[in-house]
Amino acid sequence: MDDWRGFAQQMAALARDLLAQESVNDTLRRITASATELVADCDAAGILILRGGKVQSLAPTEQVVIDSDELQGRVGEGPCFDAARSSTGERQFRIVDFTDEAVRWPKYVPEARKLNLGSMMGFLLFTEDEDLGALNMYSYRPGAFTEADETAGWLLASHAAVAFSSARTHAQMQEAIGTRHTIGEAMGILMGRHRLTEDQAFATLRRYSQDHNVKLRDVAARVCERGALP
């Protein structure tokens, strides 16, 4: 990473590009693709998240990313797994050489060698309010990542965390707006069909949701489709 001026310009362009993506998945794919484009010797990248204690791979650029994430989840250790948990308070990790790393992750490293991995880095994706997972970068060459590459990866992860959080918040808001509209439309159908008040229509939807263990938005969607409660 010799041309820091050029890298800074690329990061500025990336920040604008990330915020222009149309969905969370598009944002994540752009993040991992950018890792392979902007960080020297990064052959593959992906985002690892933990949900209910289980590992999930998001936007992997290569199959080896999925294999490594599944391995870390299976043995319960690894640099990216640790970054996603953030249990130690550390925000970034690096394996300089898989052939010379057997202390920190004794279960993960020997198996990872079988995936032909040479070196890797993991960065916690975080904002002030939340931890979002870990951005992982892999190289098939031992000793591929330098201190400068680690700095570049940390900068990319910082931009990625903000974009990821923003995209997810936007998606949640859009979903909430859509849900509210659907429920309002369903209430209107019940009010007109059964001569109910607004409160009575909403209570009817909620009672059906609770009695049948179906989410309220799904009940409303069915009413909109069929013109009545299922």
Image: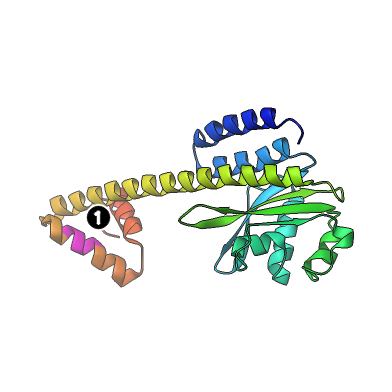
Give x and y (percent) for residue 23.
50, 41
- Residue visible at 29% across and 72% down in the picture: 211
**Bounds of the magenta segment:** 201-205
Q: Is residue 92 magenta?
A: no
- Residue visible at 14% across and 59% down in the picture: 199
Q: Identify the image quadrant of the C terminus.
A: bottom left
- Residue visible at 28% across and 54% down in the picture: 223
The extreme right residue here reads 99
- Residue 197 located left or right of residue 138: left
Identify the residue under disc 1. 228
- Residue visible at 50% across and 33% down in the picture: 20
Q: Residue 116 sits in which quadrant? A: bottom right
Give x and y (percent) for residue 210.
30, 70
Q: Nearer the viewer, residue 54 or 88?
A: 88
Q: Nearer the viewer, residue 77 or 151?
A: 151
Give x and y (percent) for residue 8.
63, 32
Q: Identify the image quadrant of the N terminus.
A: top right
Give x and y (percent) for residue 185.
24, 47
Q: Is residue 116 above or below residue 54?
A: above
Residues packed near mark 1 inside 10 Å, few (<14), some (14 to 19) or many (20 plus) = some
**Amino acid at the residue labelled 1:** Ala
